[in-house]
Image (cartoon, helix red, strand yellow):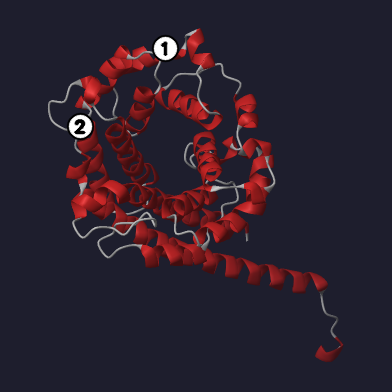
Amino acid sequence: MTRANTPISPQGDHDDAADRSRNVETETDAAAARLAHQVGERALAWLECMRGSFALTAETPDDHVEGQALKSLAELALAAGMVRREAIAGPQCADTAGRLLDFGWRQVGRGDLLYRLQARTPAATYPMEIYAPFAAAGYRHERMDRLAAHLLGLRASRVIEHVPNRRLAVVAAAATIGVTVPDDVAAMIGQTWLGGTPEPWMLDAGNAYGVTHTVFHLTDWGGRPEGLPQRLQDYLHQWLPVWAEVFCETRLWDLLLEMLIVGTCLQRPLFFPAVWERVAAAQRADGMMPNGLTTPPADPHAAWRNHHHPTIVAVVAGTLTLSRAISHATTAGGEA
């Protein structure tokens, strides 16, 4: 039989198309990973350079310590902890992350400050929420552990007047500390904006932050993608690309970066290389990520106040995108 008379195999065409699709997907994932690594590495270096701005005011009475200052330290610990957990960014970044964690832990008195705040305000949850990212990175305080376990076992902890995604934050903090709480997580999820799977065009910036944090708390910042119910995975696969495109035009870089993190928290991750191009172009040469709402002042210490948060989020987004892109490529290669 001549070649001209050889029948065409539909299965062969299908396999070729599948191979081409995988190749395109691999190339776009790689493009996102390269940009994410670049942005994350530069942002981490800026945080290291500016770490003195995170310092608490010396000899401030406990009841005068600013809550925002503690929150910033917790976010710094979270970002550095993600670099340590994923162990993907190289030894220099790992060393930087270790220094930032040590610095933050010293600022909270190696846990003593958080313990005192929790003991003084037992109904508050913020001390244990701030403690959680340090605990996740291996920085433990025995008395804080015992106190948190006691407080989380009280009936009062079941009826905290928090918004739904914040209640999930408390559950996540408890799990990180090592305390299992008997909360009905499924019911909590149903009370969140994301859990209601609303009409997607009703998402505004305020609810968008709630969506991202619901995902972060349920998946342990991408460490457990299976923690997000499948119906919400499907909803986000359908609408997250649309939201990312829309919010890319707002220049709210911290929110956009949080959406990029959400993409990495899905069991079938999404990476958005075109969005990463916009993020990389917006990042300052020194590594700072502007908030998109105000023009950063020339003095870096003055710029820190309004722009350290999106820079922290850039570290987390860059780290998780690089890590999930590599693991996704490895898994896809094994299935090919």
Q: CA distance from mark 1 to mark 2?
A: 24 Å
Count the numbered circles shown: 2
Q: Nearer the viewer, residue 217 or 102?
A: 217
Q: Nearer the viewer, residue 202 or 42?
A: 202
Q: Position of residue 242 (x, y in %)?
A: 61, 58
Amino acid identity at mark 1:
Leu
Q: Position of residue 271 (x, y in %)?
A: 52, 58
Q: Position of residue 75 (x, y in %)?
A: 34, 39
Q: Is residue 91 visible?
A: no
Residue drawn at the location 44% of the way across and 66% of the way down: 278
Q: Which quarter of the picture shows residue 18?
A: bottom right
| 154 relative to 41, above or below | above
**In this rendering, would 328 be left or right of 284?**
right
| 46 relative to 20, above or below | above
Residue drawn at the location 62% of the way across and 39% of the way down: 194
Q: Is residue 157 visible?
A: yes
**In this rendering, would 8 be left or right of 209?**
right
Label 1 CA crowd tier, 10 Å (few <14, some 14–19, many 20+): some
- Residue beneath disc 2: 107
Identify the element where label 1 is drawn.
Answer: helix
- Residue beneath disc 1: 151
Q: Position of residue 295 (x, y in %)?
A: 31, 59
**In this rendering, would 42 be left or right of 3?**
left
Amino acid identity at mark 2:
Gln
Identify the element where label 2 is drawn.
Answer: helix
Quadrant in which the C terminus is drawn:
bottom right
Q: Which mark is residue 95?
A: none
